[in-house]
Amino acid sequence: MSEVQSFVSDRRGAFGRQLVAHRKRDGRSQLALALDAGVSCRHLGFLETGRARPSADMVERLAGALRLSGMDHDRLLLAAGLAPRFADRIRDTGTLGMRAFDAAIALATSTSVARSTAIAAEFFAGIGIDHFITGTLRGAPAGWDIRRDAGGCPATAWLRHNDTHRYRNVDYLVRATAARSRGFFWSDIPAAVMNDTQRRILAEARDFRISDGFVLPIPMGDGSVRAFSSWGERVDTAAEARIAASLVARALVENLDDLKRLPAG
């Protein structure tokens, strides 16, 4: 058994949590999914709780039954400690995708916030992202509640500027994070959909050497959104960078979330 498979399956249950999330999002009971995937309900329960480890064939059957996209299928394989289906291709080409895959694997086996931050920082620097944080966004009566995780490389001066000017509840990027379910660059959002204040916020970011950023929102079952948010002066926004950034951002969010769940010591 590989180190990745052992760590992810035994200590985290990341595969089980992803499987449950996909099943509930699909609106299926445990029994219904078990029947569709050709597996016993008891074994499916063991997979969801981490008491059993999935084989590549089992992941294939479950992903097919859930009609997962290629990216979600690969994430499920990665959570199981198995190589995603695109791994051989990206290793052959030596592209940004290979570096993203290596970073995601390193994050899956990282056992400290400091190491996870360093792994992510090394990768994101390669696409022009200088600063990043992860955290949880919730709607609240008084406005958006944002709880940041430990670690990351925050753009401290820019965040302080936003707090001082109380931009959180009018920032279009915050609203977009709450509303979207896929990764996006700031530059994806047309200026025409923003009001004058929101356009001013983006203009002021340039004073802090920030011209673009990448955000990966991950909607949760309780209505909150787990998210990766980042900033940079010269960000690579090509399609390959978007896919690679999504993979590493999700791996970082899940890793930091897993580390919070591990018992101290």
Image (cartoon, grey):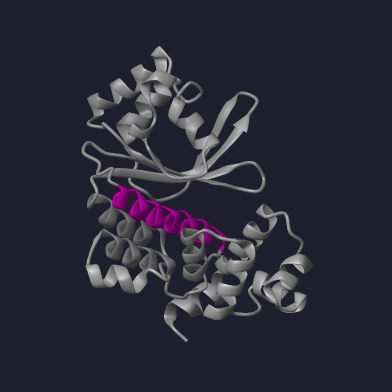
Residue 98 position within the rendered picture, expressed as x and y whole percent measured from the top left? 29, 65
**Percent position of residue 152, x then y:** 37, 49
Residue at horizontal 46 percent and vertical 76 percent from the top: 82
Q: Residue at x 33, y 38 (%)?
A: 213
Tell me which corner region of the image, top left, top right, bottom left or bottom right, holds residue 48: bottom right
* Above/below status of 253 relative to 229: below
For this rendering, which residue is in front, 34 or 203? 34
Give the farthest residue toward the bottom: 1
187 sits to left or right of 17: left
Q: Is residue 4 left or right of residue 20?
A: left
In the picture shown, does residue 263 fall above or below 44?
A: above
Magenta stretch, main secondary structure, is helix
Can residue 196 be seen in this snapshot?
yes
Q: Is residue 54 visible?
A: no
- Image vertical order of residue 194 relative to residue 249, above or below: above
Residue 260 belongs to magenta span: yes
- Name the foreground residue: 228 vs 135: 228
Residue sitting at 35 percent across and 24 percent down? 161
Q: Position of residue 30 (x, y in %)?
A: 75, 66
Residue at horizontal 62 percent and vertical 58 percent from the top: 22
In terms of image quadrants, where is residue 157?
Answer: top left
How many discs mark residues in the rendered view?
Answer: 0
218, 39: nearer the viewer: 39
Q: Position of residue 177 (x, y in %)?
A: 49, 36
Residues drawn in magenta: 239-261
The reply, left or right, for residue 249 in relation to residue 7 is left
Question: Furthest residue to the top?
Answer: 196
Q: Is residue 174 magenta?
A: no
